Amino acid sequence: QEYVLIKLKVLPPDHGQARHAKMEALLEKAGTKPVYLVPATLRPETMYGQTNCFVLPTGEYGAYQIDATDEIFIMSARAARGLSCQAYQGNEYFTKEFGQITCLENFTGDELLGLPLKAPLATYEKVYTLPLLTISMGKGTGIVTSVPSDAPDDYISLKVLQDKPDFRAKFDITDDMVMPYNVVPIISIEGYGNTSAVYMCEKLKIVSINDKAKLTQAKDETYLKGFTMGVMTFGPHSGKKVSEAKPIIKEEMIKDGLACLYFEPESKVVSRTN
Ligand code: ZZB
């Protein structure tokens, strides 16, 4: 499985929350070295529509030194180990030595919630890290970037946070972290409109992230139709088919240092459980 890791730059925490103390210290120590949350995605062409990032509140994450780029990536230890065995452009591996990882700080998902981020290509200048309870730590990096226009899980999860003040309060998420973020139409699919995830969630009457079977159906259908029939309606590749735009946008993001590739062994079992 080939994923694209997107570099969401961590900005200085701006809500004075005590849970961000470790991150403030890490940013200070890192100085000019950038610190990124690195979600794994299969859909780099949807990055224009990012509204937030998701982490698992109970998940365990680490800040890892990436020697090949002199950057710091926040992700699961499992993903860090994977990268340390993979080549990066001219370098042998992402890290100095094969399989050797350097963890600069540990974080629980909770400690990453409410962080301001700069997400590449997104229309919003700044997005926030929000909770998603269905993240599998055994897949990708354990971090997910959210595109509610084209990902049904993301649409429902953001909507629940926007509709339920109790849910926001439970995770210390303030109104300004979720309320201004509207769905951004980026891909048009004949018969599904220009926000296919919204269309599918309404059609299947999905209201909760626990409607697993319906969400899987919605995801499979939007993924397939998006790829085969979707047309970009936003950004420099507007007018191109998704299938054409996807590899171009992927290569552009890699060339511009906004993303990198991450390979993972295919495993049906791992992707279906926690
Ligand atoms: C942005 C995006 C935009 C995504 C979209 C999907 C869609 P798969 O097939 O299950 O591997 N994802 C990545 N890692 C995780 C994780 N650990 N736990 C839960 N979800 C995860 O699916 C990979 C996709 O699932 C990734 O691509 C990511 O969300 C999410 F418009 O990134 B995606 C119809 C889907 N549309």
Image (tube, rainbow, N blue to C red):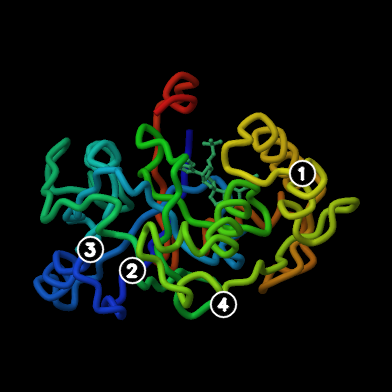
Q: Name above or below for residue 201 compared with residue 82.
A: below
Q: Which residue is mark 2?
A: 115
Tag nearer the camera, 2 or 1 = 1
Q: Are marks 4 and 1 in contact (CB under 8 Å)?
A: no
Dot 3 falls on a residue whose secondary structure is strand
Mark 3 vs 1: CB contact within 8 A: no
Which amino acid does the dot numbered 4 rest on?
Pro
Residue at mark 3 to residue at mark 4: CA–CA distance:
30 Å
Residue in the picture at 24% in, 43% down: 60
- In this view, the residue in front, 101 or 212, is 212
Q: Position of residue 168 (x, y in %)?
A: 45, 62
Counting residues from the start of the chain, the first of labels 3 and 4 encountered is: 3
The correct choice, above or below, for 46 with respect to 16 in the image is above
Cα distance between the residues tagged 4 and 1: 24 Å
The residue beneath circle 3 is: 71
The Cα atoms of the two marked residues, 3 and 1, are separated by 43 Å
- Left or right: where does residue 222 sit relative to residue 39? right
